[in-house]
Image (cartoon, helix red, strand yellow):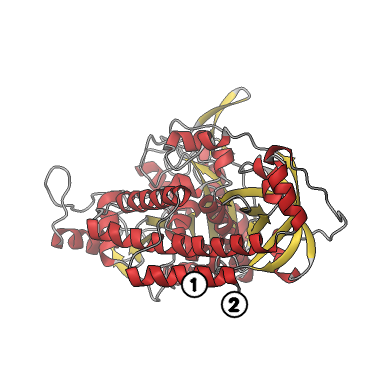
Amino acid sequence: MSTADSKVEIEEEKTKKQGTFEELPPEYLKRLAEGLKKYEEEIISTGGKVTTSGRKKKEKEIRRNLTKELKAAKREEAKASSSETPSDAASSSSTPSSSIQITNSDPTAPEVKVGDVPEHLGERIHSFGWVSSIRMHGKNLVFIALRNLGKQVQCVAHGALAKSDVIVNLTRESTIDAWGTVQKGTTEISPFEILLDYVEVIGPCPAEFEQLLNPDSGVEQRMNYRHLQHRGDILTRTMRVRSRLLFEYRKYLYSKNFEEVTPPTIVKNACEGGSEMFAIKYYDQTAFLTESSQLYLETVIQSLGNVFCILPSYRAEKSTTRRHLAEFTHLEAEMPFMEFDAFLGFIEDFICTVIDKMIEVCKDDLSVLNKDFKPLQRPFKRMTYMEAIQWLKDHDVKKEDGTYYEYPDDIPEKPERFLVDTINVPVMLMRFPACQKAFYMKKCKDDPLFTESVDVLVPTVGEIIGGSSRISDYDELCKVLEERKMDPKPFNWYLDLRKYGTAPHSGFGLGVERILCWLTNTYHIRDACMYPRYMGRVTP
C-alpha cells in the first residue's frame, strides 16, 4: 500500500472509532443542504409531512455518500501529488495559475463517444461534450463530469493541467474537447474515468448561467428557461423514458397488425362537445384545434382495419390542476369487430405489456426516477360506476354540499383519485351513465341508462385511458343526435360510416404525459412535457 493510501486508511479508521462522519468542506456542505431541501420538497409535493426522524435519516444517508466521495477524492489527490514530475512542480511553484498553458502532445487520438469510453480502458482517446459539473479538490485535482448523447463520464485533471487557464476558467455547461487516458474509477458512480492531459473549450458558457437556473428557482423561472432546464439530469431521464415509451407503444400496436395514420388537427366540429376547444381563424371561416382524432380514425377501419395515431390534442378548459394541459400527446386507436369484453382484455394487455417492457429497457433511468415501481399484476380490478358510487358512500366520501354521490353524478378528480389511491392498484372503472358520456358511445344491452365505457385509473395519477364500444347502428346514432339537440349536418360524413356498411367497433384514447407521470413518479404533468402548454404559458 502506498503512503498516500495508508494515510487515508488511518483517517478512515479514526473516523469509524469516533462514530461520526468526517467534517465536510464548504462545497460538500452546500450539496448536503441542497439534497435535504430536495428531499423536503418531494415529501411536501406528494402531500406528506417532513418529520425530524425522517430528515435525520436522510441527512445521514447523504452525509455517508458525500463522505465516501470525499475520501475517494483525497486518494486521487494524494496519488496526483505523489506522481507529479519535477517539471510539473517547478511550473506550479514559479508560474501564476492564470498564465499556465498546456499543449496537446498528440491531437490524433481516436474520437470516442462518452457512452463508449469503458470500451477503451488503457487507451488515450479524444472525447467531447458539455460540462455538467466541476468539483475542485485542493490545488492539484479537479473532477469534471462530461455529458454527451445522454451519457456522462468523469474526467480528472491533476497537476499542471488542473492549474492551467482552461481548467481554472472552465464553467459548467461549457462545451469542450478532451484528450486523456481511460482508467478505472474509484467509486461505483464512476467505474471508468478519463485522466485528462489536454482540454480545449469549444463553446464557453458565461458564469451567469448559474443565476438563471438553480435549486431555488421557482416554477415560472424554470418554465421561462425550459430550453436550458433540459440539460438537467431528471428532465433528461424523463424525456429519454418518454421517447422509449412512444417507441414501445408503436412496437406493440404494430405487432397486433395496427397501421399508424395522421388525421388532421384542424377541424370544423367537435368530437366530444366543443365548449372547451380552441377556436382559430381558418381563412374566411372559424375552425378549431382538435380535442380528439377518434372520428377520423373510424373512417379508415373499413380499409386498414386496426388503426392508431399519436398526435397533439387540445383542451381549452381553464384548469390549473397538476394533471391538465392545454396541449397533450394523445394516443388513440380504433378496432373493428371488437366487442366490449374483448376490448377490456386488449387494453389490459396493452398497458401491462408496454409497462413490463419499459421496466426492462429503462431500468437505469427508472432506478433514479421511480425505483419502487413494480410490474403490474393481472387481471386489473374491475368496478362499475354504480359500485364506485357505493364504495364512496362506504368510505364516507361526500360532495362539497355534504351529500353523497348518487346516480347520475359525475365522479370528479379528487374522489376518483382517493378511490384508486386507497385501493392502490390499477382499476378499470366501467359502465358510466349515458348522460355523462359522448354521443357515440354504445349503450349497454341490459340497461340503456349506462354505456359500454371504461376509464383506466392508476394510483397517484388517476385516469390514464378512456374508451368505449361505439354506436354502429345508423338509426340509433341519429336518434342520439336528435335527443341531444345536436345538428346532424356537420356529422353527415360520420353518419355515412354507419349508412354504408357498418360494423361493431371499439376504441380508446390514452394521455401519454399522464402515463409518463405514473411511470416516472413525476408529480406535475408539466414536467412530463418537452415544452408544456397550459393556461398562461405559451413560451418558449
Q: Is residue 492 visible?
A: yes
CB atoms at circles 2 and 1 under 8 Å apart? yes
Location of residue 98 by image quarter: top right
Furthest-top residue in this view: 284
Residue pictured at 43% horizontal, 53% vertical: 522
Residue pictured at 74% horizontal, 59% vertical: 85
Location of residue 301 by image quarter: bottom right
User: Mark 2 Cα within 10 Å, few/some/many (few <14, many 20+)?
Assistant: few
In the rendered image, residue 150, in percent from the top left (x then y), is placed at 63, 56
Decide if residue 168 is on the left or right side of residue 17: right
Q: Distance between the residues labelled 2 and 1?
A: 10 Å
Determine which residue is flagged by label 2: 1
Does 169 sit above or below residue 510? above
At label 1, the amino acid type is: Glu
Location of residue 148 by image quarter: bottom right
In the rendered image, residue 192, in percent from the top left (x then y), is placed at 65, 67
At label 2, the amino acid type is: Met
Does 458 sit above or below residue 401? below
Decide if residue 318 is on the left or right side of residue 169: left
User: Which image quadrant: the N terminus?
Assistant: bottom right
Decide if residue 459 is on the left or right side of residue 225: left
Does 192 sit above or below residue 287? below
Task: Give the SS element for disc 2.
Answer: loop
Could you say which is closer to the camera, residue 81 or residue 277? Answer: 81
Determine which residue is flagged by label 1: 9
